[in-house]
Image (cartoon, rainbow, N blue to C red):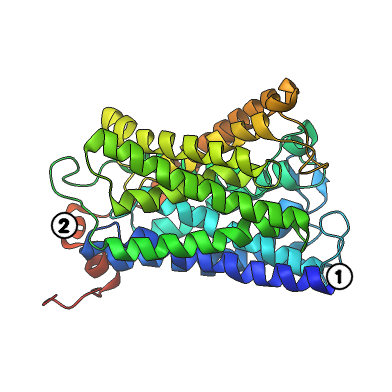
Amino acid sequence: MDTGDTGFIMICTALVFLMTPGLALFYGGMVRKKNVLSTLMHSWIVIGIMSLQWILVGYTLAFGPDNYGLIGGLDWLGLNGVGMEPNPDYAATIPAILFMAFQMMFAVITPALISGSIAERMRFPAFILFMLLWATFVYDPLAHMVWGVGGFLRELGALDFAGGNVVHISSGYSALIAALVLGKRKGFGKDSMAPHHVPMTVLGAGFLWFGWFAFNAGSALGANGLAAMAFVNTNTAGAAAAIAWVIVERLHRGKPTMLGAASGAVAGLVAITPGAGFVTPLSSIFIGLIGGTICYLAISVMKAKFGYDDALDAFGCHGIGGTWGALATGIFATTTINPAGADGLFYGNSSLLGIQVMSVGITIAFTVTATFIILKAIGLVMKLRVSEEEESNGLDLSLHGERAYSEFV
């Protein structure tokens, strides 16, 4: 066991935790003021739900001994056998309990990302049940398939350094399905639904960017050169995407916005996540530029054309950005950065791109199908959506009996 690696991953774990309160601010600023607290509550309650679910059953389902390449066994139920000694199958220089905690923070933020698509209209009891079932039947099996020893997609050769498939594609496409199943917000396309507090969103984006260094660099699972490379790639792609978004927005709408710059940075951070430990800094510039551009187009053009109400653009940023990032890994990955990976199309190996395409397709098909089934099953036992009156009054008062601001603000 290495004390330097252990200290580094403990710090990274704490920083990745900070991303979920950061997400709460990012989403909270984009809703109307009558729904601020309900939106913040989504992220905070997920911290509680997933912290317990992961310890009780989630970790063993994701990283426990393999069952047919699809899910982990129940050997580590309740963290049985997960202690202070390293598990060489996953991280040979840090305690197994710390690896578990680091992965827990990924399991916390992933379902919270989905909440952006259903903001301002989902009942709180249905939301809690959805988060719990989605984590157990979507996130945990997918994490095993991609990262678990013996996992199907891992054995296939798919590369996902820090969560392109597991975190962003899964949450993004699930967010789209959730938005479609719940339907549009009352007055969508007619009433103003402009963000009530852009500075709050910008602050949240800053926390997300800050935590993303640990999200990606920490996935090297040690204080080493690979972590440093992932760190630099993370910042580079985020910066490139923010610039790309602002430029495209200026060309398309005539004015660049602060909200656009913040959203662009998040899009770039999403796009670099799967390849952060496999590509060069120059490649990360290209990944960020394309990521910012296509995510802007997905939100400003595609959403308007098809008319779905992805309230806070969880699909536009995470679904589209994550898909591009996974494919870009198949293009730009190089073993000069990470010998444990593979060379991509740009380095003479077209087969990796094919594997990445296959892994993306499997991830989308699995998450879309499972999410639809889960939501429909919940709908059989309770209402998914608030009433029109509750929606008009705002979810803060209707569901939680409180206001974010004084009536005089």
Residue 396 falls in image quadrant:
bottom left
In the displayed structure, 146 sits above or below 392; it is above
- Which image quarter is the C terminus in? bottom left
The x, y position of residue 197, in whole percent, is 26, 63
**Labels in figure, total:** 2
Specify which label sits upstream in the sequence, 1 or 2: 1
Left or right, residue 216 beside residue 390: right
Mark 2 element type: helix
User: What residue is at 86 percent from the left and 54 percent from the top?
Assistant: 89
User: What residue is at 31 percent from the left and 53 percent from the top?
Assistant: 259
Q: Nearer the viewer, residue 227 or 404?
A: 227
Residue type (three-letter) at the residue carrying disc 2: Ser
Q: Dot 2 corresponds to which residue?
A: 392
In the displayed structure, 19 sits above or below 234; it is below
Q: Which mark is residue 2?
A: 1
The x, y position of residue 404, in whole percent, is 25, 73
- Which image quarter is the N terminus in? bottom right
Q: Which mark is residue 244?
A: none
User: What residue is at 26 percent from the left and 33 percent from the top?
Assistant: 252
Residue 205 falls in image quadrant:
bottom left
In the displayed structure, 129 sits above or below 17; it is above
Mark 1 element type: loop
Badge 1: residue crowd in 10 Å (few <14, some 14–19, many ≥20) = few
